[in-house]
Amino acid sequence: MHMARARVIKKQDRCFVELPKEFLSTDEIELFPLRDGYYLLSQPLPGERAPKPGTPGREGPSPGEIAVLHKLQSIKFGERTPENVAGLLDDGEKESLRRLEERGWVNVFKGSKYRNGVYNIADEVYPMLKGHETGRKAQDAEQKPKPAATPAVATPSYSLLRSQGYLIIKDQKDAKALSEMLKSDMKEGSVIGIKGFDGAFYVVTRDYLLRASKAVLGALKEEADVQTIAESCSLDADGVRAVLHQLAESGEVIEKRRDRYAAV
């Protein structure tokens, strides 16, 4: 396998790419956006199209791919390393995972906290999975399911929120994009988010708030800082910080000074 450069032809404010000769036998190609500035281009797979999620008339994930997505969801985000996941999948599931990666619905996310990489499910996939679950329940009740909306931006934020239960966002654009994705969740109360006086957005799932707030309030026998509370509860400091902002909003605690709280 070797890298090849293709000539870009610009004409009437449009761009055309000169393709290798093997594309002469096909009338269309498939283009997968991987991330900003990076695309995967290929001939259509035999008997299969690589759909864009949420596009009418295009197929979504196959049953096998949906099963793999649910299996990935069941694994903690920090434990979804390629090595760990490979040990949990059979050959058929590995093939489904490969197709999901080709479609851009699953990718290996790397960062300072995840140097070896972890499998990340693109945010655009979650509404489809949710729609699949809704459709299955509706089918059982002999009701027609409603199509799920497709979010406009795909980042690891949604995955992190679902896996760890909390999120602190300091960038206004990221916060706005995530709030659009979570609009229905916030409306039904499964996700709660507020803007702090420091300008950051503190988002928690209802389940995480219920679990962590009990521990946090139990640790606040006297005024304490976030790190002390976190160590006492054996919780992540950012998770405690996010919960304390929710508790301060509801009047159960008061922030005496920056990052230092007391029960009311």
Image: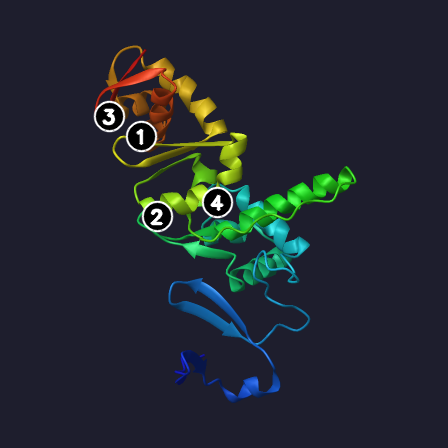
Q: Amino acid at mark 3?
A: Asp
| Cα separation between marks 1 and 2 | 24 Å
**Mark 2 or 3, which is nearer the eye?**
2
**Mark 1 or 4, which is nearer the eye?**
4
| Cα separation between marks 3 and 1 | 10 Å
Q: Are marks 1 and 2 in contact (CB under 8 Å)?
A: no
Q: Amino acid at mark 4?
A: Met
Residue 198, horizontal then vertical, whole percent? 25, 33
| Label 1 vs 2, first from the N-terminus | 2
Image quadrant occupied by the C terminus: top left
| Cα separation between marks 4 and 2 | 13 Å
Residue 63, horizontal then vertical, whole percent? 67, 53
Q: Residue at x 43, y 36 (%)?
A: 164
Q: Which residue is mark 4?
A: 181
Determine which of the numbered discs, if any, sits on residue 46 in the image. none
**Mark 3 or 4, which is nearer the eye?**
4
Q: Amino acid at mark 1?
A: Ala
Q: Which residue is mark 3?
A: 259
Left or right of 47? Residue 34 is left
Identify whether 36 is placed above or below 229.
below
Q: Are marks 3 and 4 in contact (CB under 8 Å)?
A: no
**Mark 3 or 1, which is nearer the eye?**
3
Q: Secondary structure at mark 3?
A: loop
Q: Which residue is mark 1?
A: 237
Q: Residue at x 49, y 39 (%)?
A: 183
Binning the other alpha carbons within 10 Å of mark 1 as few (below 14), some (14 to 19) or many (20 upward) gives some
Determine which of the numbered discs, if any, sits on residue 173 in the image. 2
